[in-house]
Image: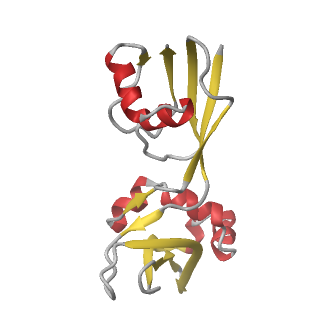
């Protein structure tokens, strides 16, 4: 029987970046955008607030782009401060690279499972609703109600197998088989 697990984001992740005002390294995105048009060119930033002092920083989304090249639906979502658009843009690797930031997903996701792992043999499909980098060992431990050490031992014994590497981080869908 195939069980389905889903990794679901519960809020926006923390942006890891050094604050120039207080030195804190954590910013919280609240979904607000700053749109600035200068004649035919447009700049767009996602605003983030320092968790230490509340100072505002800007993450560049668009820079010196012709207004006519931006889809009207996107412009509307930017002006409406669309939270789901902020979530999409924070997951864009190009945006993260351009702004020299990383994301901390700790406490910003949950694992939805059909049920806890019962029985001797389980095939499990894990689906990610967002690109959240997580260790498969952590997901398996949480989904099966085991400690990470127990999951590591099961992997060593060949009782947890998968086509993906279970020792690193993954942010895409995968399946595994658990033999107890």
Q: Which residue does the image show at 44% across and 38% down from the upper left? A: 138
* Residue at the image position 39 percent from the left and 20 percent from the top: 154
**Is residue 62 in view?**
no
> Residue 170, position in %: x, y?
41, 37
Figure quadrant of the N terminus: top right
Q: Position of residue 157 (x, y in %)?
A: 34, 14
* Relative to 97, residue 28 above or below: below
Q: Is residue 30 above or below residue 23?
A: above
Residue visible at 69% across and 74% down in the picture = 80
Which color scheme does this rendered protein use? Answer: secondary structure
Between 31 and 93, the one lying in front of the other is: 31
Question: How many discs appear?
Answer: 0
Q: From the viewer's perspective, tell me whether residue 174 is left or right of residue 100.
A: right
Residue 151 position within the rendered picture, expressed as x and y whole percent measured from the top left: 41, 27
Say whether residue 86 is visible. Answer: yes
Q: Return the residue nearer the eye: 16 or 113.
A: 113
Q: At 41% from the left edge and 81% from the top edge, which residue is drawn?
A: 52
Image quadrant of residue 53?
Answer: bottom left
Q: Is residue 115 left or right of residue 52?
A: right
- Residue 59 percent across, percent down from the top left: 43, 73
Residue nearest the viewer, comparing 177 with 75: 177
């Amino acid at each position: 029987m195939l069980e389905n697990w889903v990794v679901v984001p519960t809020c926006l992740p923390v942006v890891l970046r050094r604050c120039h005002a207080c030195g804190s390294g954590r910013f919280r995105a609240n979904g607000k955008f700053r749109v600035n048009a200068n004649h035919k060119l447009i700049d767009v930033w996602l605003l983030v607030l320092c968790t230490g002092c509340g100072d505002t920083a800007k993450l560049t989304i668009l820079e010196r782009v012709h207004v006519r090249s931006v889809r009207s639906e996107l412009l509307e979502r930017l002006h409406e401060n669309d939270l789901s658009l902020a979530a999409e843009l924070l997951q864009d690797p190009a945006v993260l690279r351009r702004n020299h930031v990383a994301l901390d997903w700790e406490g910003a996701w949950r694992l939805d499972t059909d049920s806890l792992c019962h029985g001797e043999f389980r095939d499990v499909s894990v689906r990610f609703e967002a690109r959240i980098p997580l260790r498969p060992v952590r997901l398996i431990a949480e989904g099966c109600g085991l400690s990470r050490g127990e999951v590591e031992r099961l992997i060593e014994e060949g009782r947890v197998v998968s086509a993906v590497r279970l020792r690193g981080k993954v942010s895409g869908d995968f399946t595994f088989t658990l033999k107890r």
